[in-house]
Amino acid sequence: MQKNIHLNYIKKIQTLLQSNSPFLIQNYINGELTASSNEEYLDNFNPSNGLIYSHCPNSNQTDVQLAVDAATSACPLWKNLPAENKFIILNRIAELIDIYNDELALAESSDQGKPIWLAKNEIKRAAQNFRFYATAAMQFSSEAHIMEESAINYTIRQPIGIVGCISPWNLPLYLFSWKIAPALAAGNCVIAKPSEITPLTAFLLSEICIEAGLPKGVLNILHGNGPVTGQAIIEHQQIKAISFTGGTSTGKHIAATAAPMFKKLSLELGGKNPNIIFADCDFEKMIKTTVNSSFLNQGEICLCGSRIYVEKRIYDKFKTRFIDEVNQLKVGNPAESETKIGAIVSKQHYEKVLNCIARAEAEGGNILSGGKPKNILGLENGWYIEPTVIEGLQNNCLTQQEEIFGPVVTITPFENEADAIEKANESIYGLAATIWTENLTKAHRVAGQINSGIIWINCWLLRDLRTPFGGMKNSGVGREGGWEAMRFFTEQKNVCIKL
Ligand code: NDP
């Protein structure tokens, strides 16, 4: 049998990206790559050089309806397909993502601006998402509850039907697959939309799904901007659940639209995460990880520790050493292996981050490092910003309270444990927190009092896919990961039998 016959774009992605004429990204509806019905296209930019590399459809209600029709036809087949068959197909998707890691990483980096070495890791993790949920399809089971001798209950978890998955631009294929894989594993058909700012790897995933033999209509990938395509998805009556990752204000809008239609909602939203550093930490380990947790992926990770709190007696030592490390980070061409910080995802976001830095100065912040755009030789039209460290801000100012989502952190001293906890919790967000101390009793005590959905002690971004993932307060509603995602993507039905 001829292998990989459907992977036309993936195989020639390097040539396409290097050519001077932008190519067309297509929707994936009913198992086929198609243009949008309105022939309206949006420009896609390569952040490293500011050039348009492709155009993607701005899909409308008609396209969403076509996708829903395809999913409706596919639902009975996919729902009833034996778990082992679902496992084989999802696993095959994982294999193909791994086989084409180089191509997908190049695509991700060119679309998002991240260094290629980082994109390679993330693409690997996207494959792991599919592999993990392929096995979940085989192992997820119903529950039984015996009522002494009088009755037995069994609780079936059945697929919801058609679900919507909407993801952001920071970790494009990774976060897209983090939703799609459990939705499919649980037996649903999916209407998915990546961010219009980073559509490329989702488009290439369409080819992979065709090649892997995913039945037509089971997954439909629509491109387009949030207020048009996303809005049509969240408003559609037949889409019964929405899994969304993105900004808090978009999440609020989605909740307001979907809740009156009684849709199930999973919302993974913004964060302004505290990184609490006690004097008794392993200093070297902490410094190395804190540089990463501040600036990995240009600081465009919802889990980045953007508010750094340091115990007063090591504050000066920390400041000197941290700034020294930050100044050594190479900002530059994402294609070069020594580059640690690539380009900011879009011109609009680049301007937003620079405005946030200017606001921090206006609020009395002292810029210790960075703070300016960075000019890269040969890539003068790309969007680069130096890693920026700011001190001297009140905890309640806008810089300390609002998510910046870029290479910008603040450092603030704290007096003692109680002061650290108070400062960390003074936020509308509650996604993640990091605690550094060698005193485990203190670590557990502080972890218990921080209002965040995820806490890392003496590490950061160490992820076990079985654990619940998500935030408290304005960082979201619900949890993803492991069985949590399988539970979200299923509807429970209890059957009670009198014995
Ligand atoms: P946005 O909220 O702007 O967009 C997220 C997605 O929602 C995009 O696909 C967007 O489409 C779409 N969208 C926008 N408007 C609507 C609408 N009216 N209806 C339906 N969909 C819509 O977030 P960003 O893409 O800017 O991502 C950054 C944000 O994501 C940050 O706040 C970050 O903290 C958060 N995030 C949270 C994570 C978590 O796990 N908690 C993980 C990663 C990021 P389009 O882009 O095409 O407009």
Image: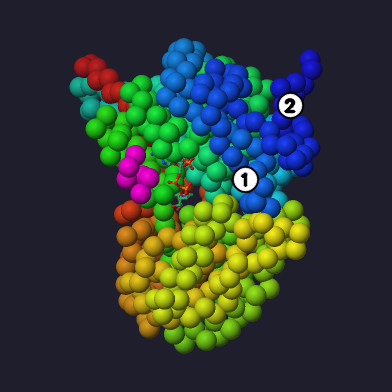
Residue 250 located within the stretch drawn in magenta: yes
Q: Point out which mark residue 45 bears.
A: 1
Q: What residue do we see at 53% from left, 39% from top?
A: 196
* Numbered disc 1: secondary structure: strand
Q: Quadrant of ligand 1?
A: top left
Q: Does the magenta-highlighted stretch encompass residue 322? A: no
Q: Is mark 1 within 8 Å of ligand 1?
A: no
Secondary structure, magenta segment, majority class: helix
Q: Is residue 355 visible?
A: yes
What's the mark number on residue 8?
A: 2
User: What distance separates the C-alpha of mark 1 from that of mark 2?
Assistant: 21 Å
Amino acid type assigned to the residue bearing label 1 in the image: Phe
Mark 1 or 2, closer to the camera: 1
143 sits left or right of 376 in the view: left
Q: What residue is at 41 percent from the left and 46 percent from the top?
A: 268
Q: Is residue 116 left or right of residue 481?
A: right
Amino acid found under the numbered disc labelled 2: Asn
Q: Secondary structure at mark 2?
A: helix
Q: Position of residue 295 (x, y in %)?
A: 58, 64
In depth, the one of 337 and 99 nearer the eye is 337
The residue sitting at 79% across, 15% down in the picture is 1
Q: The C terminus is located in which quarter? A: top left
Asked if ligand 1 lies within 8 A of label 2, the reply is: no
Span highlighted in magenta in the image? 249-254
* Residue 461 picture location, percent across and down: 54, 57
Q: Is residue 306 visible?
A: no
State left or right for residue 187 relative to residue 472: right
Residue neighbourhood size for the residue with mark 1, other residues' Cα within 10 Å, grouped as few (<14), some (14–19), many (≥20): many
